[in-house]
Amino acid sequence: MPVSTIKNYRWIIVTLLFLATTINYVDRQIIGLLKPILEVEFHWTETDFAHIVMAFTAAYAIGLILMGRVIDKIGTRLGYSLIIIIWSVAGMFHAIARSALHFSLARIGLGLGEAGNFPAAVKTVSEWFPKKERGLATGIFNSGTSVGVVMALIIVPWILNRFGWHEVFWITGAFGFVWLIFWLKFYNLPSREKRLSAEEYSLILKGQENEGEVKGIVREIKWYKLFTFRQTWAFITGKALIDPIFWFFLFWLPSYFSSTYHLDLKKPSLELMIIYAATTVGSIGGGYFSSFLISRGWPVMKARKSALFIFALLELTIIFAQFTTAAWMAVGIISLAVAVHQAWATNIFTIASDMFPTEAVSSVVGIGGMAGAVGGILFPVLIGYLLDSFKAAGNLVGGYNIIFTICGFTYLVAWTIIHLLTRKHEVVKLSELQ
């Protein structure tokens, strides 16, 4: 009996990517939300908790390189299944942990598994979307990062109050296995998906004629050759210089509002919720903008880099945060900054799928992601030094002002390097990687 086709099937796929990314960020936020309870029950010191956080960060950095390569070798269907099983099992393992060492081991498993999400998601977009739609598709799934943070703020207290902290890990860990059922039911390569119409398949293949994996042909690449291309270093630049800024926004903003505007962090914060919600708007809007330019006839790389340049200019507005005199003024400026960051991040991910064949996309995203993770480890050292120095001088706000200025100009620096490395708008061919 013939299988009925489903209209716009590719958007079902991107919905699955969005849900996976949301679950990814819910799972990684839990340990921080439960810290006040766990540190009392297990008598953690701040150093113990720092080691737990470092275990995740180090595993995540290594996992980006490792999982990116694995996914390119075994494909997205099996690759995504593998990583979500790893991180879901690791998430559940937290529930039976009884010491800082046990939690560190669980965080290592979580970091290794979760690291595969973005390499797998970007590769999936490159398989299922024509280049003119990749920006929007990437923006949609990337918005799951902010939705996951907000969902964790809602779900974790609800489960904790009705059951306990063990159940928080059991229940949220199970989300991944529920998602896996739908992934295996709905996902396959376009060439093998019988519910995909001939018209949509033709649309997907447009501009991808040389990308064998979309047609069901998996070809090996020589991984080390990726480092010989300027395009790889352009992507590394876009991640290494900019990713650390997002971690600053994510982890230090509560402290900034507390110290500068006396925000009570023991209560739900509408200010912070608005700021983090703005990232969703930036992620989807940034992806739509470059896709819109391409649909109007702009060359792909010109559209992406023009969008990045505009976002870099807009990010300069974060510098004005130092001149605010009221909390809501800061909320407005910082909301714009984090939204623009996500718009930038969406287009950087999309550029990877524009510049490289599908067979290499996960590996490239993994390499760039590790560079971003390393930057995320080093930048806090500078942040800590500046804030401690200014705090000792009785002017903590001055430290934040310098950091905001650094953040504002870094995007233009990154764009300049990316532009110089990709002036010829060349696309790496599969034959060059074999």
Image: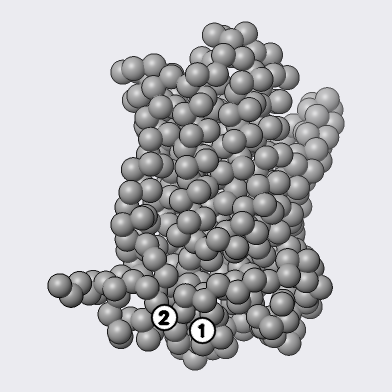
- The residue tagged with tag 1: helix, strand or loop? loop
Viewer-closest of 263 and 177: 177
Q: Which residue occupies 31% across, 57% down? A: 185
Q: How far apart, in angstroms, are the residues tagged by discs 2 and 1?
A: 8 Å
Q: Which residue occupies 70% across, 67% down? A: 235
Q: Which mark is residue 208?
A: 1
Viewer-closest of 79 and 327: 79
Q: Residue 9: in sight, yes or no?
A: yes
**Amino acid type of the residue tagged 2 in the rendering:** Ile
Q: Residue 265: in sight, yes or no?
A: no
Q: Position of residue 7 (x, y in %)?
A: 24, 74
- Residue 151 in which image quadrant: top left
Viewer-closest of 86 and 25: 86
User: Mark 1 Cα within 10 Å, few/some/many (few <14, many 20+)?
Assistant: many
**Is 364 drawn above or below residue 5 in the view shown?**
above
Q: Position of residue 202 (x, y in %)?
A: 37, 86
Viewer-closest of 248 and 272: 248
Q: Which residue occupies 34% across, 25% down? A: 158
Residue 225 in the figure: left or right of residue 212: right
**Is 429 drawn above or below residue 399 in the view shown?**
below
| Cβ atoms under marks 2 and 1 closer than 8 Å | yes
User: Mark 2 Cα within 10 Å, few/some/many (few <14, many 20+)?
Assistant: many
Q: Position of residue 74 (x, y in %)?
A: 55, 61
Q: Which residue occupies 28% across, 80% down? A: 197
Q: Residue furthest left?
A: 1
**Is 240 drawn above or below residue 154 in the view shown?**
below
Q: Which residue is mark 2?
A: 204
Residue 187 in the figure: left or right of residue 389: left
